[in-house]
Amino acid sequence: MAATIILLLTLLTVKIGDAEQQVLLKLKNPRLMNCRFDKIYQFGDSISDTGNCIRESLCKAQFWCKRPPYGMDFYKHVTGRCSNGMLIIDFIAMECDLPLLNPYKDENAEFRHGVNFAVAGSTAISAEFLAENNIDNIGATNSSLSVQLDWMSSHFHTTCSPNCPEKLNNSLFLVGEIGGNEFNFGFLQDKTIEESRKIVPEVVQTIIHSVKRIIGFGATRIIVPGNFPIGCIPFFLTKFMTNNSTAFDKHHCLKDLNNFVIFYNRYLQQAIDELKNDYPNITLIYGDYYNAFMWLLENAVSLACCGIGGEYNYNGHISCGDPMVPACVDPNTHISWDGIHFTQNAYSWLARWLIDDMLPKLNCQV
């Protein structure tokens, strides 16, 4: 499993540069092709951002993913993806037999097959709500989920109004993963798990409200992913390093952090189930990122590929993208790319697990 995934790809068109066009990579047997999606719309944070943060001045200024070795396996080109190569959304687009999504902020891009609204560092809730709960927004962007939805509204106003329900009938919407950074910021600012639990309802309701807004435009198939087990990520393993063996589970992940994520994911799942009752004709699917990652963790190396020092090859004071920080020889043998985000190979396997899990629920033709 740690070996490189072999993708049967044919590169049809690619133009990398300031006027980046939609990249079309063809899989031999796309598994989502029978769903006949003609567009994909992605909302989220750095797990999904394909180039919006680097087009925001403040975000770009503090963005470590803007420099090599990021993109080293994406035609050796830095695109704003926080990985050595492609992300989950890229593999989902390929499995739909569609081009890779261009970022909304690319003014020269082509959006016939969808848009990526995700911005690295973004949160589901607003910076104002974070401030009210004494959490500083350290994500270098104010492009929260509501802002991304405003972008969507503007885009649809010019591309599909007043016939959006008809034109979006064969579209796939992914609302997240988003809603993790607010907790990450809190933990970095010494908020307790109990304090973080108190804002879970607000985060989840913000996501659910966003899903309702998307449905209002005509969306009929929507995926809402949960969060990854952050207790297994080198960033947090380093931040909360301890000699107390009881703090870890059998995978050497921090139990308290993972139990918090389980609590959050269950809250989100329950809210999605309740929403299904209100919209019986809409396909709403929970994306189980937690179990997808745990399945992958059983079979691969979790140390950061691009990092330096420490037990997990991660140092919070000098990050990947710094000239002094090397990348490993073979990222394909690692889950973690930079201690926070994952490698292209990890994302490819996560996408495969997620598609296997979600495909029966998408009501696609066989």
Image: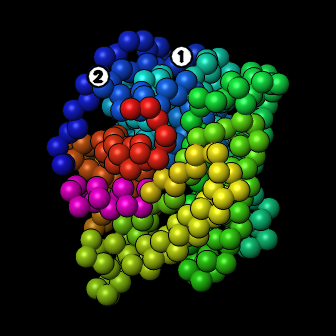
Q: Contact (CB < 8 A) between labels 1 and 2?
A: no
Camera sees residue 287: yes
Circle 1 SS class: loop
**Which residue is drawn at the image coordinates 49% and 40% (left, top)?**
363
Instruction: Say which amino acid is labelled 2.
Output: Lys
What residue do we see at 29% from left, 22% from top? 28
- Badge number at residue 21: 1
- Judge from the rendering whether residue 295 lies leftward or rightward of residue 214; answer left or right: left
Residue at x 36% of width, y 20% of height: 26
Q: Is residue 65 above or below residue 237?
A: above
Does 12 lie within the magenta span? no
Is 258 or 362 nearer to us in this picture? 362
Nearest to the observer: residue 92 or residue 124: 92
Which of pointers 1 and 2 lies earlier in the amino acid sequence? 1
* Bounds of the magenta segment: 289-303
Write the residue at 53% across / 16% down. 21
Residue nearest the observer in this picture, 354 or 70: 354
Residue 294 in magenta stretch = yes
Residue 285, above or below 50:
below
Residue 28: give its label: 2
Q: Which mark is residue 355?
A: none
Q: In this rendered view, identify the residue nearer to me: 184 or 177.
A: 177
Q: Position of residue 218 (x, y in %)?
A: 72, 36
Q: Specify the amino acid type for callout 1.
A: Gln
> At which x and y percent is residue 3?
17, 43
